[in-house]
Amino acid sequence: MKFLTEEGNKEYASWVGSIEGTDLVKPSNLLEDSLFSCEIPNSPDLPEMSFSTKFELAEVLAPIVEQLYENGLDDDKWEGVWNAMALQYFDSICRRDKDGKWKPNKGKEFYIYDSDFTRFYRHRIKGPVRLYQAGGRALEPFFQVLPHIHGDFEEFVGSSQELVSAQVILVLKALYAKQDDSGIVAGFSTRKNFPSIEKKLPAPGTIRRFVQVFKQLKRTYDLFGIDPDPFMDLLPEEFSRAE
Amino acid sequence: MSKRSFNYTKRKRLGNSDFELSLFENSSSPSEFELSIPEDDNEIPDHFQIIVDAYRGSKVMRFGMGTWGKRNELKRQRLTAFDPGENVMFRIKIVDDLDSKRRIAMWRDQIKARSHSQDGNVTKSILPVHPRDLGSIGWKLDWANPARPELQVNSKISEAQDVTSIVKNDPDFAILVFPEVIRQALTKLLKDDIEDDTERQENEWFQFGAQLAGIEAPSMEEDDDAYERESDDWVSDVTEAFGKNFELVKRYVEFKSSE
C-alpha cells in the first residue's frame, strides 16, 4: 500500500475542499503518481472493495493498520497513510445525494487527517479503526451504520482516550447493545427537558450521562484497569444492563 | 472564608516533594519522561501499582510503571503518541491492584514536568507555545489543560516554540500580546473552581502573579462581588508589574524606531 506525500496530501485536501454538491471524480491518480504517493515497503495491499457498514470497514482495515505499526512505520508517514486510505475508500466514507452529487460531512477533519486531539478521532478511517483496535467485536452493535456516519457513540467515546479501552467498550455494550448485537437500544443518547431548566440535559442512564459519571469516578478508581463487572457495580442506579 | 473539602474516599495527594518528573525533549523524535519517587513515610503497601498518565486534552498515554515496593527501579518511558514539543501534562496514580475496583490510594494531577531540552538546559516555562494553523487569528490561549494555558500562535506568523524565541525574534508580538495573555490566564484561573488551597498555592500562574504583584492572589470569598473586584485589581497589579519589570513600552518604542 501507499502513503500520500506532502504534495499528495495537499492535492487530496484541495480536492476534498471542492467536492460538495459536485460529482467531481476521485483523484485516484494520486495513488499512482510517485510525486503524490510512495510505496510502503513490506506492507499489505489494500483490498479493492466498498464497505456496507462501519464495522466491516474497521474489521477489515484494523489488521492492516496493526501491521504497519508492527513494521515500525515512521511517525511522519501516518498522515499520508490515513489520507491514502480515505482516498481509496472515499466512496464508502462520503455519501452522495439522490443526484449523485457528493455530500460530505461538515468538517474537513472527517476526510483529511488532522492530528490535533480535538479532531483526529473524527477521521472516517482512523476513528472506527482506532475504536476497533480497542474494543474489537464488542463494537459491532454500535457500528451497524454506514461508514460515513460519525454518530454519538464515536463522538462521545472516541473523543476521550480514556474511554477508548476494551473494558469501557464492554461495559457500554452491556448497557446499550441489543441482545442479538444487531444494534443499540433506543434512546441511548437522548437528552430531555427537566423542570425549571431551559436547556435539555442528558437523560438518566444515557451514554452522555455515562461520560459525565465516568469523569467523576476516574478520580477515585483506576477505571482503565477495572474489569467490566466491578465497573458496572460502580455505576449508579440510573444505569442498567440493556434488556 | 476558605472552602471546605470532603475526602470520603481517603485518597491522598502526592505533594511536590513526593516525586520528581522530568521530561526529555527532542525536536525530531518523541519526548521521554522519567519519574523518581524518593523513600518516604507514606504507608503504601509494596504491591500497590504506580500508574502514570501522560495527556494533552483527551489524548492519553498510560504507563504501568511498576510497584510501590520497586519505586527505585522506574524506567524512562517514551511518549510516542505525542508530537515532539507537544505540551504534555501528567497524572500519577498509586493504585491498589488487589482491589477489584482499583481504588486510587494516592494521586496527583495536572503535573507539568521539569523539561530538559536537547542541549541539556532545564526549563519549566509556565507558558508553552505551540505554532498552529489558526486561520485568520493571530494567537489564542488554549485551555485543554484547565490549570495551565498554552499559547497557540498562528504558524503563518511564527514557528517559535517557546516564549524566549518570541521575545528574541518577534519583540513587537511579545510586547503587544503577553500582557493580554497574562490578563486572560489569571482572570480565568481566578474564576475557576480549583479543588483545594494547596493546589491553588502550587499553581505556577498564581506563584508567578504573586511574585510580580508582591501579594498573593485573593482567596475565594462568599461575597462574589467582592471577590470579583479583588481579583480584577490583583490581575491589573500583576499585568502592570509585568509591563514595568520588562520595560515593555520602552522596548516597543526602541523596536519601532529601529525599523
Image (cartoon, coloured by chain):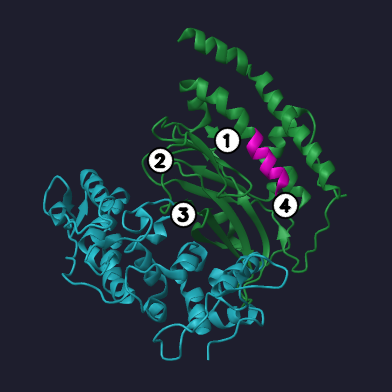
Residue B133, numbered circle: 2
**Residue drawn at x 50%, y 62% as measured from the top left:** A160
Q: Chain of mark 3?
A: A
Q: Can residue B203 be seen from the camera position used here?
A: no
Magenta region: B183-192
Residue B193, numbered circle: 4
> In the structure shown, which secondary structural element does the residue marked by tag 4 occupy?
loop
Inter-mark Cα distance, 4 to 1? 23 Å
Which residue is labeled 1 in the image?
B125
Q: Find out whether the residues at labels 3 and 1 contact each other: C-beta distance under 8 Å.
A: no
Q: Can residue B218 be seen from the camera position used here?
A: yes
Q: Respond whether the residues carrying marks 3 and 1 are from the same subunit.
A: no
Note whether A135 is above or below A108 in the view shown: below
Which residue is labeled 3 in the image?
A118
Inter-mark Cα distance, 3 to 2? 14 Å
Dominant SS in magenta: helix
Q: Colour of chain B?
A: green
Residue B65, numbered circle: none
Inter-mark Cα distance, 3 to 4? 24 Å
> In the structure shown, which secondary structural element does the residue marked by tag 2 occupy?
loop
Q: Amino acid at mark 2?
A: Asp
**Residue drawn at x 48%, y 33% as measured from the top left:** B120
Q: Amino acid at mark 3?
A: Thr
| Among the two numbered marks 4 and 1 on one chain, the one whose residue lies closer to the N terminus | 1
> In the structure shown, which secondary structural element does the residue marked by tag 1 occupy?
loop
Residue projecting furthest to the top: B257
